[in-house]
Amino acid sequence: MSELNHLNVHLVKIDSRFSIDLCEELKLSAGSEVKLLKRTSTLARRQFLVSRGLVAYILRSEWGSSSVEYLLDDSMSPPLISPQNNLQLSISHSKQYIAAVVSTNPTAVDIESATRDRDYLGIAKKAFHPSEYEILEKSESHKKLEEGFYKTWTLRECLYKLGESKGLTDQGLDTERQIRDGGFTPFSYAKGDIYLSLISSKAIKINLIRHY
């Protein structure tokens, strides 16, 4: 079981050997089978299977699911750990990547794959706090603009998942101030076109584990 002062967020690529192995070992619950049937595209089905396999892996490797028999209740949306006890789950996917975390305290993760033709400043002007927009407007390069945009966007998504914001386009939300005033621990990761953020309600060390 994970140390209480550590939190592992797992990141996988859906076509990696690790993800293929996850799917080969996966046994879906009845609720998961129903949800899978509703996924019509190949990508959506693959994302679903790998994400459920990753959750099973985390429960088994970090929380001893073989002995306490935690299950993923996919009859709910978003899915829950059953029996709930004190375990909470957050999953996010974008294109070829899946991120997931299981914790004993309120935690949210979000991952985004950069879309090159996005009007970052246009979106930020309509969606972000004025101070956040001003920072982006002063970006030294397009890459810095992209990095700043997705860091703010993913952190906002995490706050929304935890019920700490009205929505992603709430211009009254100063993301960094909300995180600071709420006592959250933030974590952000960027590499290539992948951007990931996580916030936790406890001041703990956050580790990123990449399975590819």
Image: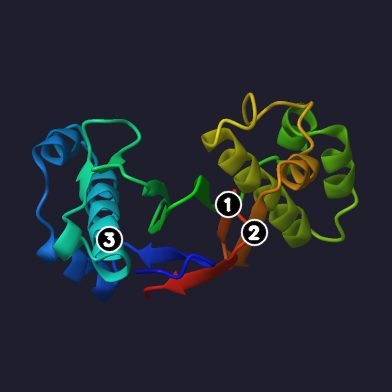
- Marks 2 and 1 sit apart, C-alpha to C-alpha, by 7 Å
The local crowd at label 2, few if under 14, some if 14 to 19, many if 20 or more residues have their Cα within 10 Å, is few
Q: Which mark is residue 76?
A: none
Compared across the picture, whether 6 is left or right of 68 comes to right
Give the residue at mark 1: 200
Q: Amino acid at mark 3?
A: Leu
In which quadrant is the C terminus drawn? bottom left
Determine the secondary structure under disc 2: loop
Determine the secondary structure under disc 1: strand
- Name the spot of residue 68 as percent of width and height, x first: 18, 58
Q: Amino acid at mark 2?
A: Ala
Give the residue at mark 3: 59
- Marks 1 and 3 sit apart, C-alpha to C-alpha, by 19 Å
In which quadrant is the N terminus drawn? bottom left
- Name the spot of residue 171 as percent of width and height, x first: 77, 27
The local crowd at label 1, few if under 14, some if 14 to 19, many if 20 or more residues have their Cα within 10 Å, is many
Number of the front mark, 2 or 1: 2
Q: Which mark is residue 203?
A: 2
- Marks 2 and 3 sit apart, C-alpha to C-alpha, by 22 Å
Compared across the picture, whether 145 is left or right of 191 comes to right
Residue 117 visible here: no
The local crowd at label 3, few if under 14, some if 14 to 19, many if 20 or more residues have their Cα within 10 Å, is many
Residue 22 visible here: yes
